[in-house]
Image (cartoon, rainbow, N blue to C red):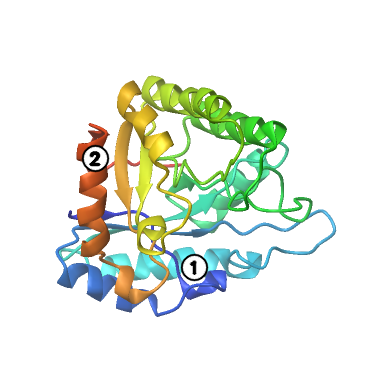
Amino acid sequence: MIYNYHTHTHRCGHASGAEEEYIEAAIKNGIKYMGFSDHMPLKFADGSESGYRVPTAEGKIYCEQIKALSKKYKGKIDIKVGFEMEYYPELFDEMLKKAIEYGAEYLILGQHFIMPENLAAKDTFRATNSVDELKKYTKAVLSAIEKNIFTYVAHPDVFNYVGDVGIYQKEMRKICVASRENNVPLELNFLGIRQHRVYPNDAFWQIAGEEKSPVTFGFDAHEVSSAFDGESLLKAKQIVEKYNLNYIGIPKLRLIK
């Protein structure tokens, strides 16, 4: 594996380590293509900000710093800067505009909430048997895929639905079909593997294999030691083989203008 476009920084408040440390660790382990995609800044209508994102005051600084490091390490590693971002229909245009203004080059979709987190009672990691919430998650991901803006869908199996399996399969198949039809890859997420989270979800990846959805890998690094994750890589390859996934390798970046 010579790529990883899912790397966070200390600016989001729940990751550690200096950006240059991530880069050095990536180079040491043979990474040739690297992307920083920290959580997209977002200011709510009341002026407050989310506690798990890059502060709005640091959005431009974040992009400028990564671009400076990209120049410094040119010839050793190709580095891009972007954001991991939710799709909120009422905020999407403004968030995309801000991402471009900050200097982001690409976006990945990470639907951690089904509505802006200042309004959401819980995130998508929390167990629920609500069909309505499951369908809202599906609708958000489908809408994002159809925008043809996001390079890929990070941890598409993040929604922790514990209700009827048949309903879950029906909704997730919609995502897998849309991924294939729009050629937007689905990320097999290594943070989920190494922290034994609710994802990767076997039920989801079985469907992805059946639908031949394009699949890519992402370290989802929140600490320098995860700038390369060989142990999770082995497990991810096993999942690819188990479900005969359409693993495409390096995703094609959808550069935003």
Q: Position of residue 82 (x, y in %)?
A: 44, 54
Residue occupying the point 63% across, 47% down: 95
- Looking at the image, which residue sits at the far front? 164
Relative to 223, is 14 on the left or the right? right
Residue occupying the point 28% across, 66% down: 71
Relative to 184, is 42 on the left or the right? right
Vertical position of residue 20 compared to residue 192: above or below: below
Q: CA distance from mark 2 to mark 1?
A: 34 Å
Q: Position of residue 114 (x, y in %)?
A: 67, 42
Q: Tag 2, which secondary structure?
A: helix
Q: Position of residue 107 (x, y in %)?
A: 46, 46
Residue 79 shows which numbered tag? Answer: none
- The residue under label 2 is 240
Q: Is residue 1 visible?
A: yes
Front disc: 2 or 1 = 2
Residue occupying the point 58% across, 29% down: 143
Relative to 1, is 195 on the left or the right? right
Give the quadrant of residue 247: top left
Identify residue type, mark 1: Tyr
Residue 62 shows which numbered tag? Answer: 1
Neighbour class for label 2 at 10 Å: few (<14), some, many (≥20)? some
Query: Which quadrant: the N terminus?
Result: bottom left
Q: Position of residue 210 (x, y in %)?
A: 32, 23
Vertical position of residue 202 compared to residue 2: above or below: above
Neighbour class for label 1 at 10 Å: few (<14), some, many (≥20)? many
